[in-house]
């Protein structure tokens, strides 16, 4: 069979992308000037490899320490299908750069494994192992064998999250909503308000806090090693310290009044007291957990639920958010002129190292507070770029690593770019 | 009632002998439940082992095809884009945009075809492979029809360019069927003609072109009559072909894959400037000549013929009957509607054809496990019945996780569908109560602004407090904020907890006045007053005086209200007597404490005023 006009499909997508208003400038409450950003849609590696499943999570495989490679393998999880999968993808090599600087060809599916229930969260434990949270309350570690490109379940905690109610005969499963890993430790949270601490080599949970929260826990992250931070559906952040035997949070921070549910949380990679959360109203909140119980700043962002927020791991003046409204945003707080410390804005490994040492004594070096915490609207500019040209259905997940970003949508598409900062 | 346009298809239910057994059924959106009944006419029949299954019968099976999901997802994006095309755009720019949209749709069809073809080739011999290849041919036919509709209805090509479009059309589709035809068409389409068409340029009018062509045609004819090529039968036959001689063309029927290939070839050599309006005459005669009475036209032939006749409604009707999905007719009709070609047509059911077809397609999507999100936008763009349809569908989406529920709620909240928001939140609140997650339950009822349910949950909290002596879910109750005002009971719960907090923080005066106001303002349910009064006891026993004389009088009044208002009911049993005993003792203690406090407060207030 000869199919003519084979490249029409790609052509059509490019056309519509160029026609749509690809870049938008957004304003934030209480902030100052915003500079128009460069359109970035040309940088998308491949617009839509359709995996025929709604994507709930996308995660880059971490690079070996000290590696100079760029990211090339990522994992995805699907949701709301009759059969759900955890899959590994490769974005191929640099070989086929086409004339426009874009990339031809699709990301390649390396392998898939069936996953019972929706994939609610996905986190790499190390380079080979990936932890999946299921809507069935089960937590599974999958092992990726790069030699023969297969995935296998290596460890599983069934019913890690469950309800015990008068209505349910014995106990019914509760969805596990969030996972965070710090090899070998794995912390999970769920709709049952329970926090579990697992170790990759232990069969049973190392620690369980029942009724840690009266409402649904939506996400969890590590603050400092024995401390974790959870966000819940009534707008609260809770800090838990596993060294303490009491099953009570050491600190509760909350949005006042509105009780807007918080859906995602990420900690600044170098300044461990700086935390970003995203809420049901699409609002981005920046918190300083050392001070007060209220957010330092509230930034009006998306029009619907913010599903994920991520600081750039090595360039933390950049932040990325995605939302139910189908948008994916790049927040750049590094454009605030020379009066600020330049240490944070150079990018690259040196600044990471320096800012890390400084963060331990941040109180002393007042001049070096994070650009996210400063509250002077006249001085600060945050440049916001909308990264996806056509909005349709929800962007459920995103991940950044080096110059690479991957995101997945309910429109069953995965988007990848390798030129975030070009 | 209109007559059926075709025989209704019969679906056999496996395992059921319809001769012997009766069946019952129930309609669902896009599907039907069917099972055997044990109903029998009169006599008790011998117990024949029946079919123990309930079958789900789905109408729109293509929705469940894994590869076609690409078609559904991507065409959804194009559809949404099309609805945004501004109405103000007129003339050329609008037409150009509509043509582009049409091409986008076709490119998605082609992409799916390509993918499906790969699967079919990879799995050549299996049943699945054969299924894929039959899907490929269906998609190919769909694209063929769409392309012709694009030329005739959207592009509205005038005489002259019309044939060029038709040539492209045939070339694109015939090539797929048989690669040999590509060569044939290539050779039958000599460069002579290409340059001939290029010749007129922009300066020449259609009439001039027609004159020149006529001239050339006559010259060919003269050569033929003069017998210039008589020595070589091949050359003579070629000349006849160039003159568009039907008989000569039909001699090479095996090279023409189908009648529309024949039609376009014929037009090319005999009527290059065919007018759109005359097209159907040539189409009909081509079909008749080509089939030659040997076989009867197939559904595809009828659809194409209807298009050549510019009968849009017939095209859509025939397609609806012939195809097993609503995707094609729904999207094509919508596009043609945007071309303002369907205004006058109203159905005797539903609202109009566009809406009817879009909603049929959408209900197929809603029935699907995960494509329901796409259906929402289709409903949005049906002004008349879309909203009602969406309301009915959205409530029936199974809510497996809160995350999914949030997505469904977002759809409802964006469209101010308060009734549905309330019902979804209620479902979730109910689920939470069943799972003993009172905090979650309260959150959901607050979100739904469901006062009755909030009262119910608050009562559960209070009951738990009375049983256990401590509050659960303090993180929630302490942070109710303005949501506390939703129901009186919730307000009471929040305030009562505030009393405990104040007491714990040793703000006794504030705690005392809050406690009193809970009773005097009637926020506290009467059944709870005794608990509140008992809570007052430790405050009355403090070293310093906390309740003022006036407050103590009010406390007394509350106590008297409570004790005097108690109805006497029937013969008390032993348990009740014992309870009453405890109650009486409590009241006695309270009275004593109140009297002593009153005495102390009078002294204190008197001495303070005195000093």
Image (cartoon, coloured by chain):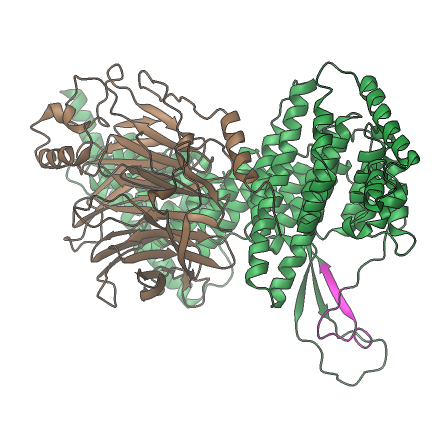
Chain colours: A brown, B green
Q: Position of residue B353 (x, y in %)?
A: 77, 38
Is residue B241 visible in the rendered structure shown here? yes
Question: Above or below — where is A68 with respect to B337?
Answer: below
Magenta-span inclusion, residue B398: no
- Residue at 20 percent of width and 39 percent of height: A269
The answer to which quarter of the image holds residue B194 is top right
The secondary structure that dominates the magenta segment is: loop
Is residue B333 visible in the rendered structure shown here? no
The outermost residue toward the bottom is B46
Q: Position of residue B230 (x, y in %)?
A: 88, 41
Left or right of B235 in this view: A242 = left
- Residue at 26 percent of width and 36 percent of height: A312
Q: Which residues are magenta?
A: B11-26
- Residue at 92 percent of width and 34 percent of height: B226
Left or right of A374 in this view: A169 = right
Left or right of B255 in this view: B291 = right
Counting every numbered tag in the picture gives 0
Q: Position of residue A64 (x, y in %)?
A: 20, 50
Magenta-span inclusion, residue B17: yes
Left or right of B398 in this view: B469 = left
């Amino acid at each position: 069979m000869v199919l003519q006009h084979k490249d029409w499909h790609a052509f059509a997508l490019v056309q519509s992308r160029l026609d749509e208003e690809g870049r938008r400038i957004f304003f934030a409450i209480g902030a100052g000037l915003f500079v128009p950003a460069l359109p970035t849609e040309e940088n998308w590696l491949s617009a839509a490899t359709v995996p025929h499943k709604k994507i709930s999570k996308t995660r880059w495989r971490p690079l070996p320490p000290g590696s100079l490679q760029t990211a090339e393998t990522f994992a995805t999880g699907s949701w709301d299908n009759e059969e759900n999968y955890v899959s590994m993808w490769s974005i191929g090599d640099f070989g086929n750069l086409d004339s426009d600087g874009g990339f031809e060809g699709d990301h390649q599916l390396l392998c898939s494994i069936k996953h019972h229930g929706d994939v609610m969260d996905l986190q790499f434990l190390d380079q080979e192992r990936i932890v999946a949270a299921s809507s069935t309350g089960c937590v599974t570690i999958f092992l990726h064998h790069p030699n023969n490109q297969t995935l296998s379940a290596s460890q599983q905690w069934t019913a890690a999250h469950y309800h015990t109610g008068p209505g349910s005969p014995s106990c019914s499963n509760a969805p596990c909503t969030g996972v965070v890993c710090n090899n070998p430790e794995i912390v999970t949270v769920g709709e049952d308000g329970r926090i579990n601490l697992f170790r990759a080599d232990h069969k049973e949970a190392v620690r369980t806090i029942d009724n840690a929260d009266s409402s649904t826990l939506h996400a969890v992250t590590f603050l400092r090693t024995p401390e974790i931070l959870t966000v819940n559906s009534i707008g609260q952040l809770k800090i838990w310290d596993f060294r303490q035997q009491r099953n009570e949070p050491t600190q509760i921070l909350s949005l006042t009044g509105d009780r807007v549910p918080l859906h995602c949380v990420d900690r600044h990679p170098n300044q461990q007291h700086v935390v970003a959360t995203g809420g049901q109203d699409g609002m981005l909140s920046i918190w300083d957990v050392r001070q007060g119980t209220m957010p330092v700043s509230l930034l009006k962002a998306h029009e619907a639920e913010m599903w994920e927020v991520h600081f750039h791991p090595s360039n933390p003046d950049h932040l990325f958010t995605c939302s139910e409204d189908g948008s994916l945003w790049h927040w750049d707080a590094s454009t605030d002129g020379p009066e600020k410390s330049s240490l944070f804005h150079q990018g690259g490994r040196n600044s990471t190292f320096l800012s890390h040492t400084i963060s331990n004594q941040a109180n002393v070096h007042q001049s070096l507070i994070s650009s996210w915490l400063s509250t002077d609207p006249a001085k600060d500019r945050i440049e916001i770029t909308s990264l996806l040209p056509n909005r349709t259905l929800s962007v459920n997940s995103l991940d950044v690593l080096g110059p690479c970003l991957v995101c997945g949508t309910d429109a069953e598409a995965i988007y990848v770019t390798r030129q975030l900062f070009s | 009632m209109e007559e059926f346009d075709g025989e209704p298809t019969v679906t056999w239910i496996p395992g059921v002998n319809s001769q012997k057994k009766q069946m019952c059924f129930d309609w669902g959106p896009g599907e039907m439940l069917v099972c055997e009944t044990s109903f029998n006419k009169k006599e008790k029949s011998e117990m024949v082992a029946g079919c123990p299954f309930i079958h789900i019968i789905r109408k729109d099976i293509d929705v469940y095809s894994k590869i076609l999901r690409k078609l559904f997802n991507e065409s959804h994006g194009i559809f949404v884009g099309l609805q945004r095309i501004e109405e103000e755009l007129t003339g050329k720019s609008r037409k150009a945009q509509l043509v582009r949209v049409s091409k986008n749709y076709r490119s998605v069809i082609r992409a799916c075809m390509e993918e499906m073809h790969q699967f079919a080739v990879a799995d050549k011999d299996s049943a699945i492979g054969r299924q894929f290849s039959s899907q490929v041919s269906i998609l190919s036919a769909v694209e063929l029809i769409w392309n012709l509709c694009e030329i005739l209805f959207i592009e509205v090509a005038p005489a002259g360019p019309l044939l060029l479009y038709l040539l492209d059309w045939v070339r694109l589709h015939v090539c797929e069927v048989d690669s040999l035809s590509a060569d044939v068409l290539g050779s039958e389409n000599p460069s002579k003609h290409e340059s001939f068409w290029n010749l007129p340029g922009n300066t020449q009018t259609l009439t001039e072109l027609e004159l020149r062509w006529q001239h050339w045609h006559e010259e060919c004819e003269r050569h033929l009559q003069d017998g210039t090529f008589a020595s070589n039968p091949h050359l003579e036959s070629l000349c006849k072909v160039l003159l568009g001689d039907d008989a000569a063309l039909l001699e090479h029927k095996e090279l023409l894959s189908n009648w529309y290939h024949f039609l376009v070839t014929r037009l090319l050599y005999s009527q290059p400037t065919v007018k759109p309006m005359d097209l159907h005459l040539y189409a009909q005669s081509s079909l008749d000549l080509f089939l030659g009475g040997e076989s009867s036209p197939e559904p595809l032939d009828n659809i194409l013929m209807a298009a050549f006749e510019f009968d849009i409604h017939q095209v859509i009707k025939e397609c609806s009957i012939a195809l097993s999905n609503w995707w094609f007719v729904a999207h094509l009709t919508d596009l043609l509607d945007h071309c303002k070609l369907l205004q006058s047509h109203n159905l005797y059911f539903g609202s109009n054809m566009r809406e009817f077809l879009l909603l049929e397609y959408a209900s197929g999507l809603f029935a699907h496990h995960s494509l329901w999100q796409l259906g929402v936008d289709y409903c949005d763009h049906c002004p008349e019945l879309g909203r009602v349809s969406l309301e009915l569908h959205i409530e029936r989406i199974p809510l497996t996780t809160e995350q999914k529920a949030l997505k469904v709620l977002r759809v409802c909240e964006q469209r101010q569908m308060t009734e549905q928001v309330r019902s979804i939140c209620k479902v979730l609140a109910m689920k939470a109560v069943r799972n003993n997650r009172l905090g979650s339950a309260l959150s959901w009822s607050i979100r739904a602004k469901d006062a009755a349910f909030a009262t119910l949950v608050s009562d559960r909290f209070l009951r738990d407090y009375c049983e256990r002596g401590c509050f659960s879910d303090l993180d929630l109750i302490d942070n109710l904020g303005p949501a506390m005002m939703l129901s009186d009971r919730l307000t009471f719960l929040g305030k009562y907890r505030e009393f405990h907090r104040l007491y714990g923080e040793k703000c006794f005066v504030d705690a005392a006045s809050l406690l009193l106001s809970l009773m005097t303002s009637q926020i506290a349910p009467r059944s709870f007053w005794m608990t509140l009064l008992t809570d007052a006891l430790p405050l009355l026993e403090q070293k310093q005086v906390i309740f003022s004389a006036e407050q103590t009088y009010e406390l007394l009044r509350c106590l008297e209200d409570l004790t005097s208002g108690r109805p006497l009911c029937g013969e008390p049993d032993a348990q009740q007597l014992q309870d009453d005993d405890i109650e009486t003792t409590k009241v006695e203690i309270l009275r004593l404490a109140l009297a002593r406090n009153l005495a102390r407060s009078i002294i204190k207030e008197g001495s303070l005023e005195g000093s």
